[in-house]
Amino acid sequence: MSHPLVTEPNFIEASAGTGKTFRIMEMLEKIMREDIQNKVSHNRLLKTVILTFTEKAAGELKARLKKKILELYKGGTNSEFYPYLRDLDQVQIATIHGFCNLVLNEYPIETGTIGKPRLTSLDEVVELNLYLLKRKSFGITAPEVLANLLQKSEFFKKEDLLKSTAKKILSDTKEYFFPATDSSPTFLTLTTDSEVSEETSTEFLQWVTLEIVKESKNTLASANLITYDQMILKLRSAIASNPSLLASLQDRFEICLLDEFQDTDKNQYEIFKSIFIKSENSSLDLYCIGDPKQSIYSFRGADIGVYLKAKNELVSNSSEASKNERSQLVTNYRSSKDMIDGYNTIFSADSGGQTNFFPIQEPGFDSSYYKYQLVKSPNQNSIKYELTEGEKAIHVIELQGNIVKMAEVRETWEKFISEEIPRLIDESKPFNYNYREKEGEEFRNKKIKLSEIAVLCENNTAALQVERDLTKLGIPCSIYKRKGIYHSPSC
């Protein structure tokens, strides 16, 4: 018997607000309904893995699935759905790291993780090993040579760069080119500071970086520690080298729904490709759901090239029955029509905007693969929000004067924010919008509330400055995901 999802496209592109979670619930409902209809004896949701990028998103997916099952169960009227409700907590809805951690813990011998490694931060391991290298004076015995090397290489200015480079190499999420260095570099044999050259100082920085990498690997292994990236690398390696582990996972799981796929790196994709695609077992399948426009985690290894490669492979391998218009979700139900039209104008060449939303060409892929697709507005009757007459969804603010330095740009932007928010909530002329609870109801006019205003900042430093500016004006605000009450300005 073929799987209920065999006619579903393996690669689904879903812009923000287009009903991606609704679609995932549709797919899970399809599994339940067809299994009941065909009298399948076991709960196939337990052989389905649903993965996303954050724990918050995973929690929301589980809550939505519970709500969906309760709707189908109808208070016991449809008792055939009871097993799905009973077994809900056993359904694998997790982050990618959560799934990898599960496999490493449940298959310690096959994955080589006997003794349950303790989770640690890669930042801490790298910081520790750089500190130890400094304590040993980098193995340099002549103080004047060391002083000259540190000065000429600008070591202390580049310290953060060395640490970030070491972390990238350890994470192994991309193919980084790094020149090979001699195991006995020349700077270790120098006896006078006059021998330190530009070439030697560059060699010194490269050597320090690779020493951090080597010693960090030793630390992780000897202390039985593991980082989030090491979880991925360990499982990928175990699957590639241990056929019995791969067979066990393929027997345990049939289907993987991989949400937020644009945030996936090459190692993560290789794991799920190995389990669910590289198999003669036709009951196994991988379904990826993502949006290349939202690929913003390159600093964590997310790679748009991986996204495009997977799209190419999965679309090519899809059955003819699954190649349909359902592979793209293009109607945004979350934003106002004005907002959607505005972004279409900015990003679409058809509307006079940019040809592609990517500023660069992705090597090896035709531009049609990542050309901006116009997003549609929903039926007017289903829209819950609309702007009042005369208001616009997008405003472009032109900075006045001859501003050259980025610091001045930031100051001007922060000043504008601290003036604009009071203007929006000014009782004499507040910002208004139209709102309705349900489809078909009449719109009601509402004044904007402070809790409905969000400020997106370039980094945490900018966010803290905006918070200070607004607090001085007596405007209550908080930074999303602040680490705790003891980190607030009040403490």
Image (cartoon, rainbow, N blue to C red):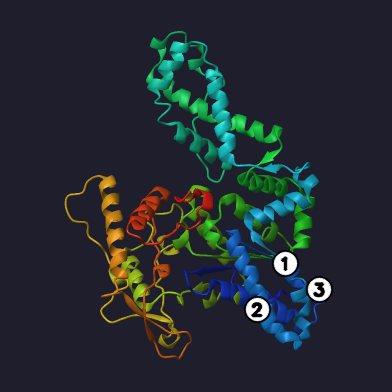
Q: Is residue 217 above or below residue 250?
A: above
Q: Are marks 2 and 3 in contact (CB under 8 Å)?
A: no
Of the residues shown, which amino acid type is indicated by label 1? Answer: Val
Residue bearing mark 2: 68
Query: With 396 as the anchor, is 44 left or right in this view?
Result: right
Quick check: can you spot residue 275?
Answer: yes
* Residue 480 screen position, x and y as percent: 48, 58
Secondary structure found at label 1: loop
Identified at 40% across, 53% down, the residue is: 463
* Residue 351 screen position, x and y as percent: 30, 71
Query: With 429 as the anchor, is 59 left or right in this view?
Result: right
Secondary structure found at label 3: loop
Of the residues shown, which amino acid type is indicated by label 3? Answer: His
Comes first in the chain, label 1 or label 2: 2
Of the residues shown, which amino acid type is indicated by label 2? Answer: Lys
Residue bearing mark 1: 91
Quadrant of the drawing holding the N terminus: bottom right
Which of the pair 227/459 is nearer the observer? 459
Q: Residues within 10 Å of mark 2 (few under 14, many from 20)?
A: some
Residue bearing mark 3: 42
Identified at 77% across, 71% down, the residue is: 87
